[in-house]
Image (cartoon, grey):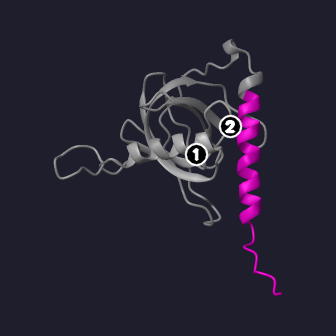
Amino acid sequence: MSARPRRRGAKRTTIAGAALALLAALAFELAPDDAREEPATAPLPRSASPAPAAPTARDGSAPERAGRDDARIEEAFRERRSGLMVAVDARVAKTLRDDEDGSRHQRFLIELAGGRTLLVAHNIDLAPRVPLAPGDRVRVRGQYEWNERGGVLHWTHRDPAGSHDEGYVEHAGVRYE
């Protein structure tokens, strides 16, 4: 019986993602409602880059990718699965105060077309802050982690180590990665 070679860091990444999702959900749960609001007055960052033009289908409509990922999130939520890289188009439902514990994360809730809400934990130690307000439209690519409240999207930035799929947040024609 020979031992299978083990991928270094794969288990650690999954555990770290699950821990981040748990901490984000706990911090959100413990924060009083009035402390969850975050002013949306941050200046536009210099390091943000313009978003590429959104691809269109032959008929000129938006691509169906975001709709498929909404369905993948719904399936992952029902099955309590984590670790999926997804891209979604959504409305900002609420801005929250930053998570300052460890790596700093800008936190906000998004609502998908089907009504599911997700917490986005955008690492502002690795990517620029996104100037958001409730009602804004965003496109978010990140890793989905299941929790009872709907889930968390994180890894919404470039990976400095180059070992993880990269994500981003697009808002008002600017990509924050």
Please state the horizontal and vertical placement of residue 138, each as a whole percent of the image: 43, 36
Residue at image x 65%, y 30%? 149
Q: Is residue 98 left or right of residue 115?
A: right
- The magenta segment is 1-27
Q: Determine the residue located farthest toward the bottom in the rendered image.
A: 1
Which residue in the structure is indicated by mark 2?
A: 147
Q: Nearer the viewer, residue 154 or 11?
A: 11
Q: Secondary structure at mark 2?
A: loop
> In the picture shown, does residue 30 fall above or below 82?
above
| Magenta span: chief secondary structure | helix
The residue type indicated by label 2 comes to: Asn
Q: Is residue 37 above or below residue 63?
A: above
Label 1 sits on residue = 76
Query: Could you tell me which secondary element the residue under label 1 belongs to?
Result: helix
Amino acid type of disc 1? Answer: Ala
Residue 172 falls in image quadrant? top left
Question: What residue do we see at 83% from left, 87% from top?
Answer: 1
Q: Nearer the viewer, residue 31 or 84?
A: 84
The residue lying at 68 percent from left, 37 percent from top is 147
